[in-house]
Structures are given as C-alpha cells and as structure tokens.
Image: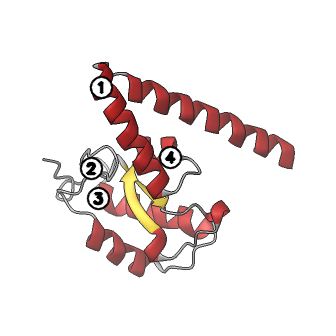
Amino acid sequence: MPNDRKRTNRRTGVDPVKARVRQMHATLRRRGGTMSLNDFRDLYRERVDDYTRCPYCLEFLTADTVSLDHKVPVKRGGSHGPENLEFVCKGCNAQKGQHTAAEFASLIRHLREWERDNRNFKLAAGVLTALRVASSFRIGANRRAKK
C-alpha cells in the first residue's frame, strides 16, 4: 500500500505530498480558481489518503500520480469549486480530456466489457491512448490558432 505521507526527501527535506498539493493549488489558481491554499489542503486531506484509488482505473493515488480534475470541464460550463473537483491519476486525467466524469466512466466501463467479451485485454489501453493523442493534437492546434 502506498504510504508516501511519512517520507520526506532526504536530500532536500521536502514532504512530497505537501509539495504536490502546493503545485496543484498553484495550477488551479492560475486557471481561475479562488480557493485558498489552506482550503485546498483541507479538501485534499478530506478526499485523499493512503488508500484512495483513482475512480476510473482503481490505481492507488500517491504524490507522484495524483492529479486534479474537473468533473465537468470548465470549457463545458464547470466551475473551479470544490464540488466540481476530484483527484484522479495523471494517466486517466490525460485520457479523459474534455469528457465529463460520467461520460468517461461510461466509456471505461464499455471498454472493459469489450475487452472481456473479446478476450483481448489490450483493447481499452489502445483506444484510450488514441483518445489522448487525438486530444493533444486538438489542444496543440488550439494553441497555435490563438497566437
């Protein structure tokens, strides 16, 4: 079981969980969130512990793998409020893209059923990778268009 709360980097003396929480909070603030660092820390402590799993892939969340996600993306009308925020693994967050949490969970469920029915346990990974690559091209195109 992951237990990175007790560990600090011996060389720098920095707690990896505190550093990751500060980093996620800074990103949220940069994108328009108004939550204070203390409120964000409380939200993290309330929702993530040593036994918390990603709601999509069920991997344990650690300071290295945790990522902040919006259940309803901001571009689709979601807010930066605590009711719209969830902690997921970095891989699922990258693959989720502009889907809502319900849409992505449904997609994952259908892909897992498809894998089971076809006895091919690499189908879901391939489809999700293709989605991530396709969304990165769209994001890159949007960035170039804005310049």
State the residue lying farthest toward the left. 1
> In terms of secondary structure, where does tag 2 sit?
loop
Q: Is residue 14 visible?
A: no
Q: Quadrant of residue 41?
A: bottom left
Say few, some or many: other residues with alpha carbon within 10 Å of mark 4 (under 14 / 14 to 19 / 20 or more).
Answer: many
Say few, some or many: other residues with alpha carbon within 10 Å of mark 3 (under 14 / 14 to 19 / 20 or more).
Answer: some
Residue 85 point in image, percent of width and height: 45, 67
Q: Amino acid at mark 4?
A: Lys
Residue holding disc 2: 9
CA separation in Å, label 1 and label 2: 45 Å
Q: Is residue 72 visible?
A: yes
Label placed on residue 117: 1
Badge nearest the viewer, 3 or 1: 1
Q: Amino acid at mark 2?
A: Asn
Residue holding disc 4: 96
Residue 19 point in image, percent of width and height: 38, 59
Residue at 40% x, 50% y: name it: 105
Q: Quadrant of residue 49?
A: bottom left
Residue at 54% x, 66% y: name it: 28
Say few, some or many: other residues with alpha carbon within 10 Å of mark 2 (under 14 / 14 to 19 / 20 or more).
Answer: few
